Image (tube, coloured by chain):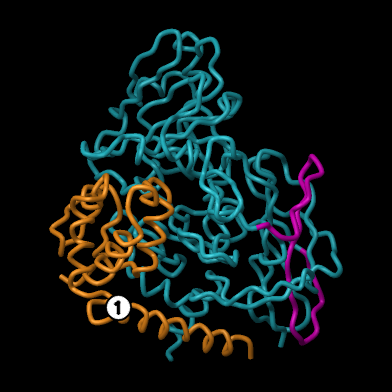
Amino acid sequence: MNMSTRIRRRHFLVGAGGTAVLGASGASVAILPAIAQDAQGGSLPSYADWKNPEAMVIHTELTLETVRDAIGTSVVTSNDVFFIRNNLNPPSEEVVQDRDAWEVSFEGVANPRTMTLGELKTLGLETVATIIQCSGNGRGLFDHDASGAPWRTGAAGCAVWSGVPVRAVAEELGGSVDGARFMTSTGGEELPEEVNRDEIVVERSVPLEAMENAILAFEMNGAPVPIAHGGPLRMIVPGYYGINNVKYVRTVAFTEEESTADIQVSGYRVRPVGESGAPDQPSMWDMKVKSWVIHPLMETTSGRVLIYGVAFGGTNPVERVEVSTDGGETWEDAEFTGPDLGRFAWRVFVLPAELEPGDYTVTSRATDSQGNVQEQTTEPNHRAYDYAGWDRLAVGVTVV
Amino acid sequence: MPYLVSMLTARVPVVVLALFTFSTGAAGGADEAMLELGRQVFLTTAEPPCGVCHTLANAEATGTIAPNLDTMRPTAEEVRNALMEGPGAMPSYADTLSDEEIDAVAEHVAAVAGAE
């Protein structure tokens, strides 16, 4: 095995969380078929061929995961390692030939109409740092065999988005109609005529109050939003799971009721294993408090070791992170490092430790400003959404 | 060493997957009639038909809105799960196709995806 292969294999296993660990709960993490995923994936799809292949686990053409330690320590996740999850195939390059010509229709306002991105850009400008995290991040850490990509930690990234505040657009158009309770965004993918629209359209409703922080983003980390990430225009709902941040947004409506699309009615609903999705179940809206270690992973040298990772509180600021090297038996406070980019961004934390040779189970536990503490374990849910338990987010580290 | 152990353990599923894929192909559990039923369901019986959204060369399906199955090359089990669940934007077929039809589509897709 040459060095290149070794590095790739190591990254792959780390990205896939392929090491069995034993948390304080006593639950060991099954070693999942990491290599089998690689066999399904292959090379980067053409719409994302500019990604760093060493940093990506390719589950399918539409599901590309960031290797666990590739998110780095600069708070912002660079575009070339940022994960991708598209529900439908992305549109062609034509949609970014003339970005300012992209049209969006606004409904459920006093004066509904269609505006180009060029027009929208005259209404306001706002920049927000927020995490985009796929609802299924951590699916691979559950034991039940839920359909979908078996993400570990890498279906999440933190980016700085610039765009037009949705509230400024609503104001320009006379305000949302009386009785509106939701903001509903629709993706611009061209759907086959033979299919009932509600069955496959990417359309998501979020509570109206989310509009206060939402922007129609045309820039991601200083670059025009790539097609792979929803360009030319993406609805960004800070603090909400990725699915609500609708790519190629074509319509924004203020509505009394939630969308009738399957992806809203029965999709992205949290329910017990074996139950069908239904509107009375919690929707995947705002994210929960979570953190994970990105260094060290697998093996390190004895002596002084910096343990670091990322932590966030969804829509609340993250206030505290503790680190354990013994699977949750004892904890020590870590310090935040780097700039605070606001309550929707994650924070990088670090804890210096003196580690003797041996085996360690390293994990972290975050607390947000409301006192919500990251859960020890995440109870199974049918679709295996958001594993946030610190038990299985732990890494087994050998110190030599 | 944990690293080596991980590597060795991780190799096992490759073999398992390879055997599994083989066993679910035309030479294994699925006979010609089943594969033909799968092709029919894929193209016409399923509502909406799979081929409207997916590309699958063997079935002359050229849908472009959903993942290209020739590139994806899913296992029969993955197709079965997807049909039952309707992950992401895909509709569930659990209530509209019989177990036999779902099995047939799964075996058909696994057998022919990427073969041409």
Q: In the image, what residue occupies the spot 30% across and 78% down?
A: B29
Mark 1 = which residue? B29
Instruction: Examine the rendered structure and indicate whether residue B33 appears above or below residue A287.
Output: below
Q: Residue at x 73, y 71 (%)?
A: A362
Mark 1 nearby-residue class (10 Å; few <14, some 14–19, many ≥20): few
Q: Which residues are magenta?
A: A351-379
Chain coloured orange here: B
Q: Colour of chain A?
A: cyan
Position in image of residue A231 (x %, y %): 37, 40
Q: Residue at x 37, y 46 (%)?
A: B91
Question: Which x, y percent locates residue B16?
Answer: 42, 83
Q: Above or below — where is A99 with respect to A86?
A: above
Depth check: give the residue in front, A235 or B90: B90
Q: Secondary structure at mark 1?
A: loop
Q: Position of residue A168 (x, y in %)?
A: 51, 18
Magenta region includes residue A277: no
For the question of whether residue A239 can be seen, the reply is: no
Q: Residue furthest left?
A: B60
Q: Is residue A118 left or right of residue B8?
A: left
Above or below, A121 against B10 in this view is: above
